[in-house]
């Protein structure tokens, strides 16, 4: 046996155990930087300023001073969230208080004499920024960008220092204002979004929020006379002249299609006085425009070039534009591009926090969130309850998801400090200026969520939005019956029944909707349901049949899905929303992903996916609501064939009918209940599964017959097929790179999720498993979190255990290994996955180098061995486990023989 073992090992010494994932470099999304996309050779340069921050959590004196000794501080990359949090961080488990960031940098020689700006996409709470010991700004608010001009403060050819003080403590002087202990989300702190260093010439296109002028600054694009034959694209470009002499300029406007071909262009001249800025406008006339919609999210590239003289380009920026026209026509509902919108606008609310990293989700994670929700059928996302990361907005534009932008708020008004109200108004102006060019923006929500504000406030915030966006296409939204609701363009409300005071008891097998009548006679405007689906008992206990942890299994997940689909009691759900007249244009589920909360010890578990973005059954429910002509026909069996699974088999599909085949017997064909109005009702096959039948077939060694097959049928043809099998003995751990084809970027802060599953020889996931998975890593990555937050080792929940991998600053190969926490001779084979991080496109500007984490939780037990020794170790370990699997088969054979003889004897 040892001789055979040695031969097998020697023959595979050069092989790498596990799977290697190839990265498609074409799948890297393009991220905007400080509000614009890059234009090469334009005189404007943007540097990634995220790397090399020295970090200290807590109070410290004199940390802003140039000569402060921070040598013992940790070196981190932003986005950074102060700490890693467990998935049970609700109840204000996260740190609140002061934190410091310090960074050393030397300005590249070629930009020393240029205008220099450090641009922070967001810092949570209140913050201060010093350059070389001089305080440049104090900022209040954790969800919108701000910038500091540093050109006159830097030392040329020398090392400079920037210090940032950040404080995510409760502070009622700026919105949201409410203390975290009574807040429905958490103030995860830190410099949690990107930081950029921007260099421009002294003549440049401005940043809208830096200019701080009504309906001005930067680029402002709107559309007029839109039809399928033509449209006017009107571009306002705000150009600044920081020189002491008058400048004669020409400004060129170029609109390109997806393939880079020029669609139309034009040029105009401008003269700008010294130390001033000027709005330079031009109208591009586009013939036969390809119009943006959720089903066709076509984007154009608009480039605006500024020239000194005839040929010398001195600045250029680019915006991605989706040309579209939105209208809310009251009783006639929502119109897109002059046509009544097909169906309802259905989607989700979204908080920005993610497992472990809190709010510090990098741009790749923002895009993955948008992709997941788009795949689930989202046509609209409502911000909950603050402006989203710019990368998420870019993704909504590119993927075709409408977005509702919300003011930072939640159930709070401060009538004692006038600064609070002033800062709300400024936040609203800044969020409109930041997001006004996004094709995805459908509604502006300038009110304070679920807040009793004074009478004058509603009119004021509605007016601010229309001041900042004075053209067609700006619509504000407000709750019905709220103060000042008469001023707003669209009203938030649940479906209003005619028989408000009667108990609704429909017949679920017959014409359900014949019993529902809606009354909107009191309201002439269009209506949208901002939050629906959460069936909570009260606001203290917070029990709900829609709040379901993925780990609670198939029964709990199905109860959640049914709550979201259709109920036999009066409640807003998919069915109800699809039953309303056109005036009621749609609704957003509360909520997309499980998330942490400040004021309750329980995380919110109503998501269609967990905080790692692993789907629940309700994810497939929503996915099935998309018509088969818009996505691939799909069928999903919400049944795991365990000994404890329901006798009923539930199927989600967007097909006309489903054929269910159980144990290789053609059971029945069922069609969705067409009395329902929802696009694709759930199909349930009663008493279709029996564990005892499965057991008898297994005992007779007819394992292949133990299946559930669902075939989706359209026009009599099978167009989709799903197969479920029970899980046999777990034999190995499978690793999956949950990256949505977006590669990991070697910038020190990008992250990706690895999912470990315990599976049998056929790859079926063992859902009922209480093991813990230990992750180990080699190469250019590190595992986030250890035992202190139950991240590594990670307990298995519903068959899987996720881990977060963060990149280093070096592009290269990363190998992740997963094994049972305490391996025995009969443990499943370890899993191994190799993938590669890629070099970032942006130039990184830093002095201090983050050190790769080396903790007991993330280090490899044989890390000091050579690559050949590691390979040998893995092969021996694998062979040992395979040999033990052979022994198990002998035991199985003995048991079978014993039973056979016992039966003969009887």
Image: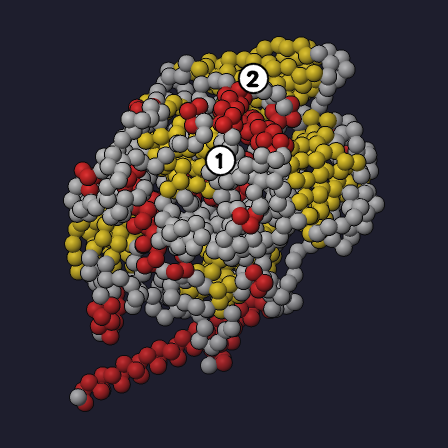
Q: How many marks?
A: 2
Q: Is residue 102 left or right of residue 31?
A: right
Residue placed under numbered mark 1 in the picture: 452
Which one is nearer the viewer's eye here, 400 or 861? 400
**Which residue is depicted at the point 45% across and 27% down?**
484
Residue 184, given in percent of the width and then of the height, sits at 50, 46
Q: Which residue lies most toward the right here?
A: 67
**Which residue is depicted at the point 22% across and 70% down?**
692
- Structural crowding at the residue carrying mark 1, measured as other residues with C-alpha within 10 Å and reported as few (<14), some (14–19) or many (≥20): few
Image position of 451 with respect to 58: above or below: above
Residue 449, given in percent of the width and then of the height, sits at 48, 37
Q: Disc 1 or 2, which lies upstream in sequence?
A: 2
Which one is nearer the viewer's eye here, 216 or 184? 184
Residue 638, given in percent of the width and then of the height, sits at 30, 55
Which one is nearer the viewer's eye here, 157 or 166? 166
**Which residue is depicted at the point 66% across and 56% down?**
852
Q: Quadrant of the C terminus?
A: bottom left
Q: Return the mark for residue 236.
A: 2
């Amino acid at each position: 046996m040892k001789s055979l073992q040695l031969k097998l090992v020697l023959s595979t010494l050069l092989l790498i155990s596990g799977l290697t994932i190839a990265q498609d470099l074409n799948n890297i999304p393009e991220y905007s930087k400080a509000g614009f996309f890059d234009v090469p050779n334009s005189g404007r340069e943007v540097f990634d300023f995220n790397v090399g921050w020295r970090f200290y959590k807590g109070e410290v004196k004199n940390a802003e001073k140039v000569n402060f000794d921070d040598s013992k501080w940790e070196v981190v990359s932003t986005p950074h969230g102060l700490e890693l949090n467990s998935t049970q961080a609700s109840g204000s488990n996260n740190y609140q208080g002061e934190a410091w960031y310090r960074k050393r940098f030397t300005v590249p020689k070629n930009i020393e004499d240029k205008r220099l700006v450090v641009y922070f996409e967001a810092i949570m709470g209140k913050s201060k920024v010093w350059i070389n010991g001089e305080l440049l700004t104090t900022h209040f608010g954790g969800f919108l960008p701000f910038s500091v001009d540093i050109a006159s403060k830097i030392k040329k050819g020398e090392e400079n220092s920037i210090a940032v003080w950040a404080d995510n403590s409760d502070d009622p002087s700026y919105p949201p204002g409410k203390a975290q202990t009574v807040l429905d989300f958490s103030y995860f702190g830190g410099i949690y979004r990107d930081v950029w260093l921007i260099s421009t010439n002294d003549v440049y296109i401005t940043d809208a929020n830096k200019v701080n002028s009504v309906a001005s600054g930067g680029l402002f694009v709107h559309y007029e006379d839109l039809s399928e034959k033509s449209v006017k694209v009107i571009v306002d470009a705000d150009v600044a002249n920081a020189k002491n002499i008058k400048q004669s300029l020409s400004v060129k406007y170029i609109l390109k299609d997806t393939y880079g071909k020029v669609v139309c262009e034009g040029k105009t001249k401008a003269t700008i006085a010294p130390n001033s800025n000027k709005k330079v406008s031009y109208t591009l006339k586009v013939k036969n425009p390809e119009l943006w919609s959720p089903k066709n999210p076509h984007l154009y590239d608009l480039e605006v070039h500024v020239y000194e003289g005839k040929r010398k380009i001195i600045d250029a920026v680019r915006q991605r534009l989706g040309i579209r026209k939105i209208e809310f026509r009251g009783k006639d509902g929502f119109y897109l591009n002059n046509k009544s919108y097909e169906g309802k606008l259905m989607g989700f609310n979204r908080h920005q926090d993610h497992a472990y990293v809190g709010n510090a989700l990098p741009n790749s994670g923002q895009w993955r969130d948008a992709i997941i929700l788009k795949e689930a059928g989202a046509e609209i996302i409502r911000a909950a309850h603050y402006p989203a990361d710019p990368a998420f907005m870019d993704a909504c534009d590119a993927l075709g998801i409408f977005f509702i932008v919300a003011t930072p708020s939640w159930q709070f008004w401060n009538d004692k400090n006038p600064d609070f109200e002033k800062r709300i108004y400024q936040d609203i102006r800044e969020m409109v200026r930041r997001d006004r060019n996004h094709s995805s923006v459908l509604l502006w929500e300038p009110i304070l969520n679920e807040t009793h504000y004074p009478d004058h406030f509603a009119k004021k915030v509605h007016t601010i939005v229309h001041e900042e966006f004075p053209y067609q296409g700006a619509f504000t939204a407000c709750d019905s019956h709220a103060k000042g609701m008469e001023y707003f363009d669209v009203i938030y409300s649940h479906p209003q029944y005619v028989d408000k005071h009667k108990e609704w008891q429909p017949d679920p097998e017959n014409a359900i909707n014949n019993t529902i009548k809606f009354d909107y006679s009191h309201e002439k405007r269009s209506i949208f349901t901002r939050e629906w689906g959460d069936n909570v008992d009260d606001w203290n206990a917070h029990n709900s049949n829609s709040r379901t942890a993925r780990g609670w299994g198939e029964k709990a997940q199905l109860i959640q899905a049914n709550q979201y689909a259709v109920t036999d009691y009066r409640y807003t759900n998919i069915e109800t929303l699809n039953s309303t007249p056109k005036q009621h244009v749609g609704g957003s589920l509360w909520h997309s992903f499980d998330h942490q909360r400040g004021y309750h010890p329980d995380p919110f578990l109503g998501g269609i996916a967990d905080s790692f973005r692993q789907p629940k059954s309700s994810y497939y429910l929503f996915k099935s609501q998309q018509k088969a002509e818009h996505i691939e026909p799909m069928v999903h069996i919400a049944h795991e064939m365990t000994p404890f699974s329901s006798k009923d088999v539930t199927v989600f599909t967007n097909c006309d009918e489903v054929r269910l085949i159980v144990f290789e017997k053609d059971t029945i064909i069922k069609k969705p209940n067409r009395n329902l109005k929802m696009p694709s009702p759930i199909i349930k096959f009663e008493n279709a599964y029996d564990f005892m039948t499965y057991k008898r077939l297994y005992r007779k060694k007819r394992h292949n017959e133990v299946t559930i097959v669902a075939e989706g049928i359209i026009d009599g043809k099978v167009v989709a097929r799903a197969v479920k099998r029970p899980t046999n003995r777990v034999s190995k751990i499978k690793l999956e790179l949950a990256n949505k084809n977006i590669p990991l970027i070697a910038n020190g802060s990008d992250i990706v999720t690895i999912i470990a599953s315990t599976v049998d020889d056929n790859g079926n996931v063992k859902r009922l498993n209480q093991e813990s998975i230990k992750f180990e890593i080699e190469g250019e990555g590190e595992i986030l979190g250890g035992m202190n937050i139950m991240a590594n080792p990670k307990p298995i929940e519903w068959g899987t255990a996720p881990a977060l991998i963060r990149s280093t600053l070096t592009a290269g190969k990363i190998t992740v290994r997963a094994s049972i926490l305490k391996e025995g001779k009969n443990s499943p084979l370890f899993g191994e996955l190799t993938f590669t991080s890629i070099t970032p496109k942006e130039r990184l500007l830093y002095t201090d180098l983050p050190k790769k984490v080396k903790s007991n939780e993330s280090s490899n037990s044989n890390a000091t061995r050579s690559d050949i020794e590691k390979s040998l170790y893995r092969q021996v370990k694998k062979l040992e486990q395979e040999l033990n699997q052979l022994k198990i088969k002998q035991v199985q054979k003995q048991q079978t023989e014993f039973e056979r003889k016992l039966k003969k004897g009887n």
